[in-house]
Amino acid sequence: MPAQAEVSRDVYDVVIVGGGHNGLVAATYLARAGRSVLVLERLDVTGGAAVSTRAFAGVDARLSRYSYLVSLLPSKIVDDLGLEFAVRKRSVSSYTPTVRGGRATGLFVGGGEERTRASFRALTGSDTEYAAWRDFYATTGNVARSVFPTLTEPLPTRDALRARIGDDAAWHMLFEQPLGIALEERFRDDLVRGVVLTDALIGTFSNAHDASLAQNTCFLYHIIGGGTGDWDVPVGGMGAFTDALLGAARGAGSEIVTGHEVLGIEPGDPHSVVTYRSGSGEGSVAARKVLVNASPEALAELIGDGAPTERAEGAQLKVNMLLRRLPRLRDASVDPREAFAGTFHISEGYGQLETAYREAAAGSLPSAPPSEIYCHSITDPTVLSPELAGRGYQTLTMFGLHAPARLFAADNDAKRAALLKSALAELDSVLAEPIADCLAVDRDGRPCVEAKTPVDLEHDLRLPGGNIFHRSLALPFADESRPTGRWGVETAHENVLLCGAGAVRGGGVSGIPGHNAAMAVLEQ
């Protein structure tokens, strides 16, 4: 669909700064409600971090380059907007290789209850850990079913959300004490503890006993999606979602212009003024409401407010690979197509996660970088050309933990290369052959592997500090210690709202901040 070249009028009901997925969600809701809507996007394409890209020269594989799985997207948004978009369930939850008694083995979660139970028993010697696992996730499942529907409603108070959950013990475990306490009370096996903890550390530089409860907040968002906590595969890649949104937004009447960088916002009543720069020069446009699909730090800069006191910081290494075939595993009892179909945990035992955190906190790259891998193309081969799929090619996505931006502030290129080398070495340690032997090559003969540090993400997408959530995640209720407004999108300026991941209940590929900002506008 060709991009609109220029802004067509001087005044709109709503101007949206940024054409990421949340901005497109807001644009579609508002345009369908009869508002005149303009979306200004700095890049030449919309989608933000939720895009698909042919990352390797001459290779017809569309990778979800940045965001890659869907959990928090409510079906309500897909249905409301009539999006032609689907996700698929992964057949396997996770596989975590390890060595016990000098033998390569692992924990396999998936394939039905009996298979999972047998894997726990083979790893730990009894059914105790599996019983604890089932009990723990039954509790978190009840919390998820209570909390998830509230994400597209006005913010509940803390007391109202607690009453809705209706389980004081679960509330205390997840909302009031460091998650590590519950994990150490409930589980005895180091590997089992680590597998549970990983969901608390995605893009979050924290540890099990962090008094700030940053790990608890991250964990909560990872286990409540859809009321089940499932992390699903977007059919056609992440770009299929934002392509569908772009079509819906334009079909509803939104004007969307790319190559237009917003330079400033002057809040006002009845109109705010947005200035921008495009290939044709600088211009300005007025709007009754301005929605900012960018970080709180970017918003402060655009308005001229003081910068937020807390500087955002990302903490991940994102690696994309294309393989000629999946590698064989040291644990020959598991088919690689099953092991990589879910989340494949590497060096993510409880003790290993703590060691890596302490090393990074002390200013060093982790010596054994923890990471997790999954293979999109096993569940959805449409991201590969028929030729590549027929030849057995597979994608591989690695998400590394405990890689805070501060480690890459000096000499990003060298640090990226060093961490990638270490991360691939950790992967090799559980394989029966080096991953390098399985990598495809591009048309110039280069291995199909690319890595992105937080510094790279800030450069590519203007994520502050490379933080994939735009700032520290906030618990999903109104908090007197932080002004949040009725929908969690309001700012100090009445006619300017946040509609990006930095809103309360933002983060992840969800569309929730976009929905909530639109609801706030329509309600006003």
Image (cartoon, rainbow, N blue to C red):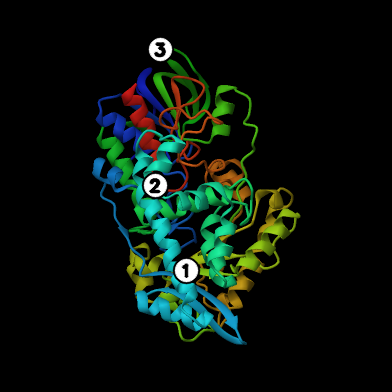
Badge 3: residue crowd in 10 Å (few <14, some 14–19, many ≥20): few
Instruction: Give percent across and percent down for residue 255.
Output: 33, 30
Quarter of the picture holding the N terminus = top left
Q: In which quarter of the image is the C terminus?
A: top left
Residue hosting label 1: 132
SS at circle 3: loop
Q: In this view, does 409 lie to the left or right of 321?
A: right
Q: Nearer the viewer, mark 3 or mark 2?
A: 2
Residue 174 coordinates in the image, percent (x, y): 50, 51
> In this rendering, would 380 be left or right of 446?
left
Q: What residue type is labelled 2?
A: Ile
Check disc 2: other Cα within 10 Å, few if <14, some if 14-19, many if 20+.
Answer: some
If you read the primary sequence from the N terminus, does the residue marked by circle 2 or circle 1 appear first?
Answer: 1
Task: Return the residue nearer the eye: 475 or 452.
Answer: 475
Mark 3 lies on residue: 270
Residue furthest front as drawn = 168
Q: Is mark 3 in CB contact (under 8 Å) with mark 1? A: no
Depicted 194 relative to depicted 97: above or below: above
Q: Which amino acid does label 1 sit on?
A: Ala
Q: Marks 3 and 2, Cα distance to the nearest angstrom?
A: 41 Å
